[in-house]
Amino acid sequence: MDKISIAVPCYNEEPALDPFFAAVSAVAEQMPGVEFEFLFIDDGSRDGTLEKILELSRRDSRVKYISFSRNFGKEAGIYAGLENATGDYVVIMDADLQDPPALLPEMYRAVTEEGYDCVGSRRVTRKGEPPIRSFFARLFYKLINKMSDAEIVDGARDFQMMNRQVVEAILSMGEYNRFSKGIFGWIGFRKKWLEYENIERVAGETKWSFWKLFLYAIEGIVAFSTTPLVISSVFGLLCCALALVMIVVVIVRTLVFGDPTSGWPSMVCIMLLLSGIQMLGIGIVGQYLAKTYLETKHRPIYLVRQTNIEGK
Ligand code: UDP
Ligand code: MG
């Protein structure tokens, strides 16, 4: 009998957990012949999420959990889920029911009968999201796909079902700075996409502020592309070329017209512009250096405080 593990990263999801568990259990019942395992990853929640999970695990022996020592972020939650899932197929799912459990049977069919390794989901609308956020999200996907060789699909959710091979592939990417959307795109394999309309979360609120999303976008670009370094080098070269031309122009002008001192304000503007560009360049290099620094420390991706998984 096949076993499906549902890995659920949870951060402050107390009100969402009961409806989530009920909804997924209902779908599980419609799939006889498949064993289910629930793996809740409590990502250092500050509300009653852990108590709720403990209650579920007492009620239902299919419920496993890992509770982190602090908030490590959703990426770490996903990694812990994949690392500890024991199923033949693993599904990553949000706790807020924005990932429709009704897609599970179709996903299972695709990986067992249609020969896919992985079934992803993408929302084709962004209903209920602030327009500015949608605009920048679209822009981000355009940019990163130009810059990176990992295919990152607009609107792709983390909600997906994958077979063991794909799980092992993702786990083999042991980087500390985990940008899952990039990792999922980078590994390749045969992936089927299911599309659905955006669904608003059932309870609680989103953990993503605009600022957090912005930082996440930069992280994604730094993690999956070195194009910004190329851009800053090319820009540096262009500035040098321009400066050489200017030097010749100024020398000729001084010799021919004898006016060496005018143009002071424009000089200040140019200096400001160029020092700004320099700072930006250093900043870009610094981003990569910082990430390299963090990687070289080989810190664990997450730390467990409490779990009901044996040998953990
Ligand atoms: N999440 C997490 N750790 C975090 C932030 C979020 O495990 O630091 C979980 C959260 O509990 C939810 C999922 O990641 O199950 C997606 O978060 P959210 O719904 O806030 O994001 P959105 O759907 O708005 O993109
Ligand atoms: Mg959500």
Image (cartoon, rainbow, N blue to C red):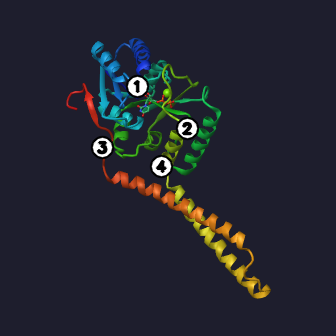
Percent position of residue 65, x then y? 30, 25
Of circles 2 and 3, which is in front?
2
* Most foreground residue, 226 or 70: 70
The answer to which image quadrant residue 173 occupies is top left
Residue identifier under label 4? 224
Taking 242 as reference, is 208 left or right? Answer: left
Q: Where is residue 199 in the image (x, y as percent from the top left)?
A: 55, 22
Looking at the image, is mark 3 or mark 4 earlier in the sequence? 4
Judging from the image, what secondary structure is the residue with disc 1 in?
A: helix
Marks 1 and 3, the one that precedes in the sequence: 1
The residue that label 2 is drawn on is 210
Viewer-side label of 2, 4: 2
Task: Depth check: give the residue in front, 247 or 275.
Answer: 275
Residue under numbered circle 1: 112
Q: Residues within 10 Å of mark 2 (few under 14, many from 20)?
A: few
| Residue 58 visible in this rendered orientation of the protein | yes
Residue 84: horizontal and vertical position, in percent? 29, 31
SS at mark 2? Answer: helix
* Mark 1 vs mark 2: in front: 2
- Of mark 2 and mark 4, the one earlier in the sequence is 2
Q: Tell me the amino acid under the disc marked 1.
A: Thr
Per the rendering, the mark at residue 300 is: 3
Considering only vertical position in the picture, is 49 above or below 116? above
Distance between the alpha carbons at the discs numbered 2 and 4: 21 Å
For the residue labelled by badge 4, is the local secondary structure a helix, a strand or a loop?
Answer: helix
Three-letter amino acid code at the position of disc 4 = Phe
Q: Are marks 3 and 4 in contact (CB under 8 Å)?
A: no
Of marks 2 and 3, which one's residue comes earlier in the chain?
A: 2
Left or right of 248 on screen, residue 214: left
Q: What whole-number distance in Å separates the C-alpha atoms at marks 1 and 3? A: 34 Å
Instruction: Report, in whole angstroms, how far the alpha carbon at label 2 lies from the one at label 3.
Output: 28 Å
**Residue at position x 51%, y 57% in the image:** 284
